[in-house]
Amino acid sequence: MTVLGQGMVWHKQLRLRRIRFLLVMLFFLILVSPVRSDPIPDPIDPYTILHAYYKTIGGIPRLKSITTVYTEGKTEYDGLQGRFKSWEQTPLRYRLEEDFNIISQIQGDDGQVSWKKDPNSKVTILRDEQTIKRRRIALGFENFEHMDPTSSLFKVSYQGVQQVNNHRCHVIKICNQLNPDVLLNFIDRKSFLLIQSIDQQPDMEIHTLYSDYRNENKMLFPFHEESQILPRQKKEINQIEKRIINLPIEPALFSIPSNLSPDYHFLQGNHSENIPFQLIENLIYLEVKTTEDNRLWLLDSGASMSVIDQGFATEMGILPQGKIKGYGFGANFDLHFVKLPAFRVQGVAFEEQTIFSFQGLAEKFHDPLCYGILGYDFLSRFVVKIDYARGQLSLYDPKVFVYKGKGAVMDAPLKNGVFTFPMTVDSIYSGKWSLDIGSFNTSIHYPFAKTNNLFQKKGVYRISRGLGGEYIEKTIRFDHLAIGNAIIQNR
């Protein structure tokens, strides 16, 4: 029952990458008054186009003289409208603040690591493998490594001419050696303005149109950006109202924020141990006490933010505000934001929380009846111990917790709020796996299964359900899997 409110919560990182390209890939976004360029030869060399572009906009030395950019304006994401401010500074420093009234968040990079502060003020450092690789790629663009035909990091190619609205555009493709991401840039053949970019990633594409170019400090900037995130069916519009170049910025602005005082407290001491739960079809159901009564909620680390059934929320007098698209198991669905009043899980009292609501959530469950999902935002506050054999959950204050057991410690950086770690199946199929306690079985990502011809193995097809509807799975028997030094046999 994975729920990703992808957009407001995690997909903003993708927009931050585009914002950071204002410095990282400055040649796409900053233009000066056009001057006569050298003719483009035939066949067309992509580096010739880029060099002609740079010459048109004033040259690389001028671009390198830009060290900071401050931007503010209006933003719209799915059904939410708000305002944003961003600060950027070379190398790789940025800070983005967004306020949608019902929800606000901050994300950034201090030049060493990326971080985010979620709507409930929890700070997370992003150090998963893909984030680290994309930071290295961003630094390469910032240092103009893509302009070197002998670069060991980038490969640039010309993809012909395509029509984008009423513009005939050169298409420049940029690949890298660190990950499968591909960037396509559509540059107008006459004006050399960037008309569109397509950021292709393994599981999504971001199509961004640029318009409303304005002259500022002898440079032309696009003040309007409109993005479509596919296949998530999400839409984002940014209308820039102010942009200041080389504004002095204090380095502390990019520092990782400190966590605020906890928005919860233990009723006794600094932990709550042996909280009983029901384990049904390998899923954990906890009793949650709200102003109405005690109801069962699903515990799901794959949910980026907790979710409440909208019908149950209405009983409590909670009205939905602002709509965005959610995503899970390849399906899209609508989510709203609500303010959940103070609630309790055995031994722990929580203050008001901003969470999602979903119409018809309770109807997705038959036995037991379930009225909400406690997601990453709940779990990230604690050190969590799950004893499946006894059906007990324990929550500890991370500031004072000290592990004294005999278990192995593994490095498991968070990706989209889910732990990731290396695992091998049958000593053959290796990769990074996600630990999602809201998934009732172990599963393999479809592209990986297809690449390794796993669908050719014998198995049993079945239908499962999530918030987005039904989907088909194939269950295949393997002999064993290895996590760290532990081997788990299939018996």
Image (cartoon, grey):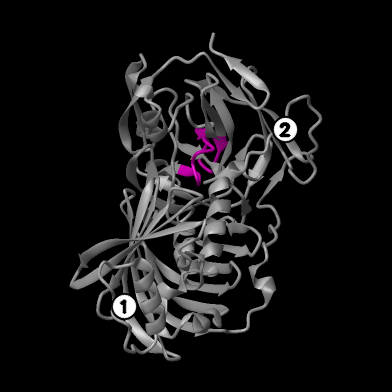
Name the one closer to the observer, 24 or 81. Answer: 24
Q: Secondary structure at mark 2?
A: loop
* Left or right, 128 with reference to 369: right
**Residue on which the image places disc 1:** 192
Above or below residue 248? Residue 376 is above
Name the residue at 55% across, 52% down. 133
Residue 12 visible in image = yes
Q: Nearer the viewer, mark 2 or mark 1?
A: 1
Percent position (x, y) of residue 190? 25, 79
Percent position (x, y) of residue 34? 33, 88
Above or below residue 211? Residue 117 is above
**Kind of residue at badge 1:** Phe
Mark number, residue 409: 2
Q: Which image quarter is the N terminus in?
A: top left
Q: Earlier in the sequence, mark 2 or mark 1?
A: 1
Q: Dividing the picture into quarters, in which one does residue 464 lie?
A: top left
Name the residue at 31% across, 30% down. 471
Percent position (x, y) of residue 155? 43, 57
> Range of the magenta residues?
288-307
Q: Secondary structure at mark 1?
A: loop
Percent position (x, y) of residue 385? 68, 30
Mark number, residue 108: none
Graded by Cα atoms within 10 Å as few (under 14), some (14 to 19) or many (20 or more), the crowding at tag 2 reads: few
Name the one closer to the observer, 172 or 439. Answer: 172
Q: Which image quarter is the C terminus in?
A: top right
**Kind of residue at badge 2:** Val
Name the residue at 56% across, 31% down. 287
